[in-house]
Amino acid sequence: MLLKNTSKQFGHISVLIHWLIALAVYGMFALGLWMVTLSYYDAWYHRAPNLHKSIGFLIFIIMVIRVIWRFISPPPKPLNSYSQLTRISSKLVQFTLGIALFGILFSGYFISTADGQTISVFGWFDIPATLAKQGVQADTAGIIHLYLAWLVVVLSLLHGLAALKHHFIDRDSTLKRMFGFPPNSK
């Protein structure tokens, strides 16, 4: 089992983190869209936001681990077949996705703590409110949260479509590498 990345292949830890975050982000996006449709009398009116906040904090922890892991185990080098435009756009999209994800997580924190209340993470522990009662904090953070969430969904869809294009049209090993397979595997 290949844990660390090599110059040609993603290791299993990077692959696990990548797909775990991808699944969690889409799940959280769907949960967020559903949450805003709930009425005050719905049984999930309070439970869904608490679940959303708890999962959001776990995503934050995984994102911090991901950043640290990139220093411990740098990603593979781009394939030689990639054009300069492909290399630049890939780096730009990946960087934007990372920054936007952290922006979503921090804006979610500012929404959740605007009233001075702590965030309970599955009842295991509480995260304190640090910048509470800053006027329109919840509204501003909510707008940022919404637009960044849409940005991440759109960019990640483009990211996925690019991987499929590499696999089916260019017939290179980009998608195989994203699943942890060596570039020359069939």
Image (cartoon, helix red, strand yellow):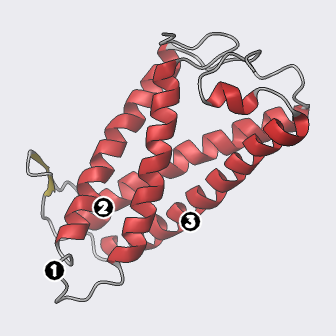
Q: Does 57 sit left or right of 173 as displayed?
A: left
**Amino acid bearing label 3:** Trp
**Amino acid bearing label 1:** Ala
Q: Does 136 sit left or right of 7 as displayed?
A: left
Residue designated by label 2: 110
Query: From where the camera sits, is residue 114 visible?
Result: no
Q: Earlier in the sequence, mark 1 or mark 2?
A: 1
The secondary element bearing badge 3 is classed as helix
Toward which corner of the image does residue 85 lie, by quadrant? top right
Q: Earlier in the sequence, mark 2 or mark 3?
A: 2
In the depicted structure, whether residue 165 falls above or below residue 146: above
In the depicted structure, whether residue 140 falls above or below residue 29: below
Residue designated by label 3: 150
The secondary element bearing badge 2 is classed as helix
Q: Position of residue 100 (x, y in %)?
A: 53, 51
> Of residues 17 and 64, which is closer to you in this image?
17
Q: Position of residue 17 (x, y in %)?
A: 45, 32
Q: Position of residue 94 (x, y in %)?
A: 64, 40
Q: Nearer the viewer, mark 1 or mark 2?
A: 1
Toward which corner of the image does residue 28 lie, by quadrant? bottom left
Q: Earlier in the sequence, mark 3 or mark 1?
A: 1
Q: Are marks 1 and 2 in contact (CB under 8 Å)?
A: no
Residue designated by label 1: 43
Q: Nearer the viewer, mark 3 or mark 1?
A: 1
Q: Are marks 3 and 1 in contact (CB under 8 Å)?
A: no
Toward which corner of the image does residue 184 lie, by quadrant? top right
